[in-house]
Amino acid sequence: MASSTDLSRIKESSDTGKQQNRVVTEEEWLQKWEANNIGFHNEQGHPLLKKHLDLLLNGRSGLRIFFPLCGKAVEMKWLADMGHSVIGVEFSEQALKDFFVEQNLSYSEGSIPEISKAKVFKSTSGNISLYCCSIYDLSSKIAGKFDGIWDRGALVAINPCDRERYANLMLSLMDKNCSYLLATVSYDPNKYKGPPFYVPEHEIESLFGKFCEIKCLQMQDVFSERQKVWGLDYFLEVLYLLKIFPG
Ligand code: SAH
């Protein structure tokens, strides 16, 4: 795996400690939204997406871009404004409605025939479709395949025991030229229970390495007061680019 940054002073833990068995329920996520306990939301949008946007787009226009576990990520509006189609999935209806209201976008609500009780929220302009359901309810049959994926707060938010299922689903949603930008976090998993959960580099390799070329684009220490309160003393954000092997 290629790595452009050397943060050798920080030793990556090789095991994920007690996090392996930790489960956060749908109910708990919905409660976070209800209580506005959403410190993960970044109103300014993510600097790493801005910085590496060219790698996601790869000179192409009019792409279908997927936001797994989208919350109310403002980057969805950025990409839609550039003329791409944005498809997100999130099980908090409140998050999705807040997204449209906060971004000043009118929307309509529909059902998804294939998934009982699920809803889809579509911007009136038609280029943002947000599915309100569990990510595991989606398939390429329902949502199609994607040219690009922005995965921030997604692989790191799902329960560690579901990573293989999640990775296989993502692989099935990638079109052959898909650029998958994947942001993970790295910290001492014995000091904080997550989410976000620590995902070691070797796990990215074992989840995706059989089918994808994996490039580590950047690793940076983004430690702040928030992580200090969690009891941590370092907190890295790591960005990967995944591309399906040609052939
Ligand atoms: N990607 C967003 C949100 C990150 S927090 C951002 O960067 O701001 C993770 C989000 O995933 C939460 O909003 C939570 O409600 C949602 N979520 C967790 N598990 C999910 C699942 N299995 N299916 C759909 N949404 C899920």
Image (cartoon, rainbow, N blue to C red):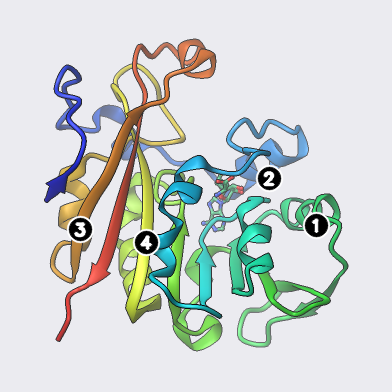
Callout 1, which amino acid? Answer: Lys
Q: Which circle, 4 or 3, is nearer the viewer?
A: 4
Q: How far is the residue under mark 1 from the one under mark 4?
A: 30 Å
Left or right, 5 with reference to 105: left
Q: Position of residue 186 (x, y in %)?
A: 31, 31
Q: Which circle, 4 or 2, is nearer the viewer?
A: 4
Which label's residue is closer to the chain start, 3 or 1?
Answer: 1
Which label's residue is closer to the chain start, 4 or 3?
Answer: 4
User: SS at mark 4?
Assistant: helix
Residue assigned mark 2: 30
Up-down: is 175 above or below 49?
Answer: below
Residue assigned mark 3: 214
Callout 3, which amino acid? Answer: Ile
Q: How far is the residue under mark 3 from the one under mark 1?
A: 35 Å
What is the crowding at mark 1: few (fewer than 14 residues within 10 Å), some, or many (at least 20)? some
Q: Position of residue 54 (x, y in %)?
A: 42, 61
Up-down: is 159 above or below 213?
Answer: above
Residue assigned mark 1: 97
Residue assigned mark 4: 55
What is the crowding at mark 2: few (fewer than 14 residues within 10 Å), some, or many (at least 20)? some
Q: How far is the residue under mark 4 from the one under mark 3?
A: 13 Å
User: SS at mark 3?
Assistant: strand
Up-down: is 57 above or below 1?
Answer: below
Residue at screen point 59% across, 74% down: 84
Q: Position of residue 25 (x, y in %)?
A: 55, 45
Residue 132, by quadrant, is bottom right
Residue 103 appearing in the image: yes
Q: Does the numbered disc 2 mark a residue whose Cβ is under 8 Å from ligand 1? A: yes
Which label's residue is closer to the chain start, 1 or 2?
Answer: 2
